[in-house]
C-alpha cells in the first residue's frame, strides 16, 4: 500500500455564480522515494487538490464532496482540525511558490526553523537549534551557524527557497508537497533547487508531490506524472510514458507548447540599424553615498531593421533596464541612443512624443500593465486618439480591427481587464502596443507570467504580428528556450554588461562564455527542449 | 463563420460608443438597492431644505413665548423649543446650514486634497518633499487658533466657515491620495501610458485618479459627518452660526442641555442627522463598489 492513497477526491466551490468543480474525482497515489508531479494550467485544480487534503482551502466556499485520502491508516478528509494540524506539522509539509512572501520578515531564520520543532516535539531549544543548523547545511547553505541568526531580507530568492525547504523538512515529514517551488526563481537557481529537491527525496526516502504548470520543469525529476485539466486527471503514468506515448490530446498539446524549435534567422539587408546604442550606462543611486548600482554598464548594440533580437540574462542582469532605457522610459546616465538615426538620448518628453508612436513596449505582467478601470475599448482607443490615427468616426472600426488582429473577440470590447484570463490580457496589451503601427517594440518578458500553452499562443501571435506589420523587436527574456524559438540573434547579458552575442544556433551549439554555458545547462528539461527525448509529440513549428 | 462575424459586427455597431467609467458606475449604482434608497432619502432631505422658505408654515425665528417648550402636536408636528419656535421648521432651516457646510467644505477638501496629493505622489522627488512638508506645517497649526484668526481678520461669515473647515480637511485627503498614487505610479500601466506618449496631466487624470477613487469615496463619506459636527462645535463656541439661525449640530447641543425635561428637542434633530448620515454611508458604500469594475458585474 502506498504512502498516500487518494481515491476519487472531489472538491467543489459553491460560489454565487454556481458550483465550480475545482477537483472532480481524481485518484492517485504517492509512495516513499517517489516524485509525483501534478501538471496543469492555472485553475486546473492541481493546488486545490493538495491543499484540500490538509484542510487548507477556504471553507466555505470550498467543500470536499467525496472521496478519501488515506495516509498512515487514516483518512485525511475525515480528520478534525486539530488532528490535521498534527499531520501538517509532522506527516506532510508544504513548500510554497513565492519564497519572498512565505518567510516572516520579522523573525530570524533560526527562530522560524525551530518553531515547528518546539511545537511538535519535546526537543529542547538547544537541540532544535542544533538540528536546524544541520539541516541548513544539508540544503546547501554555507556558514549555517552564522546564517541561523540572519534575517530573511539578507537572503536571495534562491537561498530563501532553500530555507523554506529546510523548514519543510525539519519535522521529518513523509511527504513534501512542493507547489511551483521554482516558478519565482531564475533559471540557474531553479536548476539548483530542482536538483536539491531530487537529492533530498532520494536520500531521505520520502515522497514528493511536485505541482507545476510546466512539463519541462519536471522532465528531469519526476518519476510519475499526472496531467490535470479542469479538475480531472486526464492522463497519468510514468515519466517516460507521458513524454513518449502521451495519448490524451491535452497532454500532447502541453508537450507541443514547449518551444522546441530554433528559428531560422531572417535574411537582413543590414543597411540601417533601427536602433543603435553606444556605450549606454544606467546607474541607480549615487557614487557619493556608495550605493551606486550599475544596472547597465557600457552596452553597445545594434538592432537591425526587421529582426527579432533576443536579450537573455538572469534577474538583476539589467536586461529590462536596458530595454526601458532604449525607449527612454529610464534615463540613461551616459552613452547614446540612436533611433532611426536620430539621437534621442537628450530629448525632452514633449520632443519624444511624436517618436513614441514608432517605438512601443509590451510588459511582463498583463495583470499590472492594464489600467483596471479602463475597458478594452478605452485602452485601445487611447493611443489611436492620442496620435491622431483615428478620429471619432473611424474609432470604433479601428478598435475592432485591432482586436481582430490580436485575436480578441469583438463582443468583449466593453469588458474590464479583470474579466479576462492572463493570455487574453496580454493580447490586449499587445494590441495597445501595435495600435500606433510602431516600427520597433521592446517586449519585456511578455510570456513569463503565462501558462505554457498560452505562452505558445502568444509567441505565435507575436511572430505573426512581426511578419504582418514589419516590426523590429527587442525580446527580453530569462527563458532561453523561448528566445531560441523566436529570435534571429541572441545577446547574453550579465551584471549589466553584454557578454556574448550570436545567432540562436551559435549560442546553443557553441557557447563561448562560461556564463552562457551555465545558462544553457540550467534550462529545465533540456532533453525535452532539444528534442532528445525520443519521439516527443507535437508538430514542428 | 462569416455569419457570426456579421452578427458580431452588427451588435457591436449598435453598441454605445466608449462607455465611460462614470456612466458605467451609474449603471452599477442603480442596481444597488441600499445605495439608491440612500440617494432617495438624501435627495428628499435636500429638496425640503432648499424649499424651506416656501413650504414651511412658520419662520425659523418666529417665537410663540406662550407656548414655551411644547410636545409634538397637530400644529407643531415635532413640538416647539423653549422659545416656542416650531422645531420642524428649525430642523429644516438647520439642515440648510449643515448640508451646505457638509457638502461645500467636503467638496473643497476633495478638490484640493485629491489634486494636491495626486501631483505630489506622481511627480515625487523634491516637489513631493516640499509639498508634503507644507501639509505637515498645516497639520501642526492649531486648528482653533487658525479659525479664530480667520474670524478676527475677515469677520464672521458663513462662507469663511466653509473655507476654514475645508482648508483643514483636505490635508488628510492629500496624504491618503499621495500614498495611493505613489504605489500606482510604480504600476506598469502607468509606464505603458508614458511609453504611449501621454502627457503627465492626462496620465494623472485618466490613469491614476480613477484608480484612487475607492479610498477617496470612502474617506469623503467619512468627512461629511465629521465636517457637520465640526460646524456644530464651532457654532457652540460662538465661532460659527449664530442664533436665531441654526444648524443640526447646534440644535443637538441645545437639545442635550434640556434632554431630561424636553427629550424631543434632542431626539428629532438627532434623527434628522442620523438619517442623513445613514443615507450618506449607504450611498458612499454603493459608490465605492460602483467605481470598482471588479465588484461583481452580474
Image (cartoon, coloured by chain):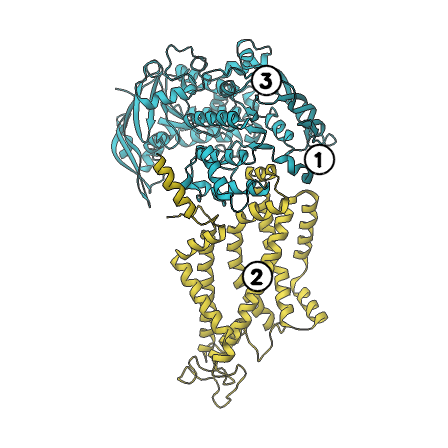
Q: Which residue is mark 2?
A: B106
Q: Chain of mark 2?
A: B
Query: Disc 2 on helix, strand or loop?
Result: helix
Respond whether the residues carrying marks 2 and 1 are from the same subunit. no
Which x, y percent locates residue A283? 68, 29
Visual hue assigned to chain B: yellow
Q: Which residue is mark 3?
A: A268
Mark 1 or mark 3, which is nearer the start of the sequence?
3
Tag 1: Cα neighbours inside 10 Å, few (<14), some, or many (≥20)? few
> Where, quadrant-wise, is the N terminus of chain B in this rendering?
top left
Q: Is residue B274 visible?
A: no
Residue A327 quadrant: top right
Determine whether label 3 and label 1 are within 8 Å by CB. Answer: no
- Percent position (x, y) of residue A526? 46, 14
Is B2 situated left or right of A439 in this image?
A: left
Q: Residue at x 50, y 16 (%)?
A: A263
Q: Colour of chain A?
A: cyan
Amino acid at each position: 500500500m502506498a504512502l498516500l492513497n487518494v481515491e476519487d477526491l472531489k472538491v467543489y466551490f459553491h460560489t454565487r455564480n454556481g458550483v465550480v468543480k475545482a477537483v472532480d474525482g481524481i485518484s492517485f497515489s504517492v509512495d516513499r522515494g517517489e516524485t509525483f508531479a501534478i501538471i496543469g494550467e492555472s485553475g486546473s485544480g492541481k493546488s486545490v487538490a493538495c491543499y484540500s487534503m490538509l484542510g487548507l482551502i477556504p471553507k466555505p466556499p470550498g467543500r470536499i464532496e467525496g472521496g478519501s485520502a488515506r495516509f498512515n491508516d487514516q483518512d485525511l478528509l475525515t480528520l478534525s482540525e486539530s488532528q490535521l494540524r498534527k499531520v501538517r506539522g509532522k506527516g506532510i509539509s508544504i513548500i510554497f511558490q513565492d519564497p519572498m512572501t512565505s518567510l516572516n520578515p520579522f523573525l530570524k531564520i533560526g527562530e522560524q526553523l525551530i518553531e515547528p520543532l518546539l511545537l511538535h516535539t519535546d526537543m529542547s531549544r538547544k537541540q532544535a537549534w542544533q538540528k536546524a543548523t544541520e539541516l541548513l547545511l544539508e540544503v546547501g547553505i554555507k556558514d549555517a551557524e552564522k546564517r541561523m541568526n540572519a534575517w530573511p531580507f539578507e537572503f536571495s530568492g534562491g537561498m530563501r527557497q532553500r530555507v523554506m525547504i529546510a523548514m519543510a523538512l525539519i519535522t521529518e515529514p513523509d511527504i513534501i508537497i512542493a507547489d511551483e517551488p521554482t516558478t519565482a526563481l531564475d533559471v540557474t537557481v531553479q536548476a539548483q533547487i530542482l536538483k536539491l529537491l531530487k537529492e533530498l527525496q532520494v536520500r531521505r526516502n520520502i515522497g514528493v508531490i511536485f505541482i507545476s504548470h510546466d512539463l519541462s520543469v519536471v522532465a528531469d525529476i519526476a518519476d510519475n506524472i499526472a496531467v490535470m485539466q479542469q479538475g480531472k486527471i486526464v492522463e497519468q503514468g510514468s515519466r517516460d510514458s507521458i513524454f513518449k506515448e502521451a495519448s490524451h490530446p491535452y497532454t500532447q498539446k502541453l508537450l507541443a507548447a514547449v518551444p522546441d524549435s530554433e528559428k531560422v534567422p531572417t535574411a537582413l539587408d543590414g543597411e540601417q540599424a533601427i536602433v543603435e546604442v553606444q556605450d549606454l550606462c544606467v546607474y541607480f543611486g549615487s557614487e557619493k553615498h556608495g550605493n551606486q548600482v550599475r544596472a547597465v554598464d557600457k552596452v553597445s548594440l545594434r538592432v537591425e531593421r526587421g529582426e527579432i533580437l533576443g536579450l537573455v540574462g538572469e534577474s538583476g542582469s539589467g536586461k529590462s533596464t536596458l530595454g526601458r532605457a532604449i525607449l527612454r522610459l529610464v534615463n540613461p546616465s551616459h552613452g547614446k541612443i540612436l533611433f532611426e538615426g536620430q539621437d534621442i538620448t537628450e530629448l525632452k518628453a514633449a520632443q519624444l512624443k511624436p517618436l513614441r508612436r514608432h517605438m512601443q513596449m509590451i510588459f511582463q505582467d498583463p495583470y499590472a500593465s492594464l489600467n483596471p478601470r479602463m475597458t478594452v475599448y478605452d485602452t485601445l482607443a487611447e493611443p489611436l486618439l492620442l496620435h491622431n490615427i483615428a478620429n471619432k468616426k473611424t474609432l470604433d472600426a479601428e478598435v475592432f480591427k485591432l482586436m481582430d488582429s490580436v485575436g480578441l473577440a469583438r463582443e468583449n470590447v466593453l469588458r474590464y481587464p479583470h474579466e479576462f484570463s492572463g493570455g487574453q490580457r496580454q493580447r490586449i496589451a499587445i494590441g495597445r502596443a501595435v495600435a500606433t503601427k510602431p516600427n520597433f517594440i521592446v517586449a519585456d518578458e511578455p510570456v513569463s507570467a503565462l501558462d505554457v500553452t498560452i505562452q505558445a499562443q502568444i509567441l505565435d501571435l507575436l511572430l505573426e504580428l512581426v511578419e504582418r506589420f514589419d516590426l523590429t523587436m527587442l525580446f527580453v527574456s530569462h527563458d532561453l528556450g523561448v528566445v531560441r524559438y523566436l529570435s534571429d540573434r541572441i545577446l547574453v547579458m550579465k551584471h549589466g554588461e553584454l557578454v556574448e552575442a550570436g545567432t540562436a544556433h551559435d549560442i546553443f551549439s557553441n557557447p563561448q562564455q562560461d556564463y552562457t554555458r551555465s545558462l544553457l545547462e540550467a534550462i529545465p528539461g533540456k532533453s525535452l527542449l532539444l528534442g532528445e527525448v525520443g519521439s516527443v509529440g507535437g508538430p514542428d513549428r | 463563420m462569416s455569419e457570426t462575424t456579421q452578427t458580431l459586427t452588427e451588435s457591436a455597431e449598435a453598441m454605445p460608443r466608449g462607455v465611460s467609467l462614470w456612466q458605467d458606475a451609474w449603471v452599477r449604482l442603480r442596481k444597488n438597492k441600499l445605495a439608491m434608497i440612500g440617494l432617495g432619502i438624501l435627495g428628499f432631505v435636500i429638496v425640503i431644505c432648499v424649499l424651506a422658505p416656501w413650504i414651511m408654515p412658520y419662520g425659523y425665528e418666529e417665537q410663540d413665548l406662550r407656548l414655551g417648550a411644547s410636545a409634538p402636536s397637530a400644529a407643531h408636528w415635532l413640538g416647539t423649543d423653549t422659545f416656542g419656535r416650531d422645531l420642524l421648521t428649525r430642523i429644516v432651516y438647520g439642515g440648510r446650514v449643515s448640508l451646505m457646510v457638509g457638502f461645500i467644505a467636503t467638496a473643497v477638501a476633495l478638490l484640493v486634497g485629491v489634486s494636491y496629493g495626486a501631483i505630489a505622489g506622481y511627480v515625487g522627488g523634491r516637489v513631493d518633499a516640499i509639498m508634503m512638508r507644507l501639509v505637515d506645517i498645516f497639520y501642526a497649526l492649531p486648528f482653533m487658533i487658525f479659525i479664530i484668526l480667520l474670524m478676527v481678520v475677515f469677520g464672521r461669515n458663513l462662507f469663511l466657515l466653509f473655507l476654514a473647515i475645508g482648508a483643514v480637511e483636505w490635508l488628510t485627503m492629500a496624504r491618503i491620495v499621495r500614498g495611493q498614487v505613489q504605489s500606482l505610479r510604480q504600476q506598469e500601466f502607468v509606464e505603458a501610458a508614458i511609453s504611449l506618449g501621454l502627457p503627465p496631466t492626462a496620465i494623472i487624470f485618466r490613469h491614476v485618479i480613477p484608480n484612487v477613487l475607492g479610498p477617496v469615496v470612502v474617506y469623503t463619506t467619512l468627512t461629511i459627518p465629521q465636517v457637520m459636527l465640526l460646524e456644530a462645535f464651532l457654532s457652540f463656541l460662538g465661532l460659527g452660526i449664530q442664533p436665531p439661525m441654526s444648524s443640526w449640530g447646534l440644535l443637538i447641543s441645545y437639545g442635550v442641555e434640556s434632554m431630561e425635561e424636553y427629550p424631543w428637542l434632542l431626539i428629532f434633530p438627532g434623527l434628522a442627522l442620523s438619517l442623513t448620515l445613514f443615507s450618506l454611508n449607504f450611498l458612499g458604500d454603493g459608490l465605492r463598489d460602483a467605481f470598482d469594475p471588479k465588484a461583481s458585474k452580474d
